[in-house]
């Protein structure tokens, strides 16, 4: 114990950096738990899709046409506010939102939650993570 106190006394900047990193980690974890949507890894998403979850792809039409989750609906994030009524039939069932890398889908998730959707999820890592897991993609312009 005396050695620990001596180390703390001689290295205040290292201790301060460690405390800051720990606080940032705790803050990030608290924010993650307070979100009203959940991030799902590709394998978890497959299980939910097999149970009947709807998949919403918010990438532009051109990217969607190159490859998307089988059965996904495409509403680009820029059009989401004006076309959200198309999704009303999915309000009571799980919806998985996917984008390219998983970043844009968080904004779309917040929009759906504000509009009364009950079980909103995002695909962690987006379509890139889906491809990295070697999961199948459907090609073509289906909306």
Image (cartoon, rainbow, N blue to C red):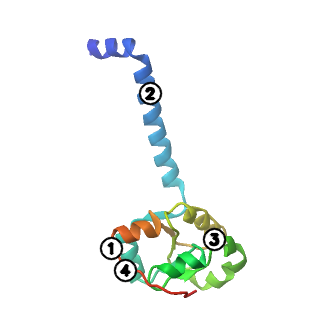
Residue 134 got which mark? 1
Q: CA distance from mark 1 to mark 4?
A: 7 Å
Q: What residue is rendered at 40% in x and 23% in y?
A: 14
Between circles 3 and 2, the one closer to the viewer is: 3
Q: Is residue 16 visible?
A: yes
Residue 113 sits above or below residue 52 on the image: above
Q: Circle 3 is placed at which residue position?
A: 77
Q: Residues within 10 Å of mark 3 (few under 14, many from 20)?
A: some
How far across and down, in percent of the image, does residue 64 sit?
53, 78
Q: Nearer the viewer, residue 137 or 23?
A: 137
> Residue at label 4?
136
Kindly identify which numbered label has been placed on residue 81: none
Position of 82 compared to 131: left or right? Answer: right
Q: Observer-nearest residue: 4 or 10?
A: 10
- Give yes or no for contact between labels 3 and 2 (Cβ–Cβ under 8 Å): no
Query: Residue visible at 55% across and 88% down?
Result: 142
Alpha carbon distance from label 1 to label 3: 25 Å
Q: Secondary structure at mark 2?
A: helix
Q: Are marks 1 and 2 in contact (CB under 8 Å)?
A: no
Q: Residue at x 44, y 27 (%)?
A: 17
């Amino acid at each position: 114990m005396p050695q620990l106190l001596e180390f703390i006394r001689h290295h205040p900047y290292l201790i301060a950096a460690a405390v800051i990193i720990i606080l940032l980690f705790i803050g990030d974890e608290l924010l993650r738990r307070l979100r009203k949507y959940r991030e799902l890894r590709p394998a978890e998403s497959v299980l939910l899709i097999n149970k009947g979850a709807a998949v919403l792809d918010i990438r532009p039409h051109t990217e969607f046409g190159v490859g998307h989750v089988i059965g996904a609906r495409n509403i680009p994030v820029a059009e989401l506010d004006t076309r959200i009524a198309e999704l009303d039939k999915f309000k009571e069932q799980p919806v998985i939102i996917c984008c390219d890398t998983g970043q844009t889908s968080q904004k779309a998730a917040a929009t759906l939650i504000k509009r009364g959707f009950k079980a909103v999820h995002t695909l962690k890592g987006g379509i890139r993570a889906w491809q990295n897991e070697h999961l199948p993609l459907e090609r073509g312009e289906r909306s």
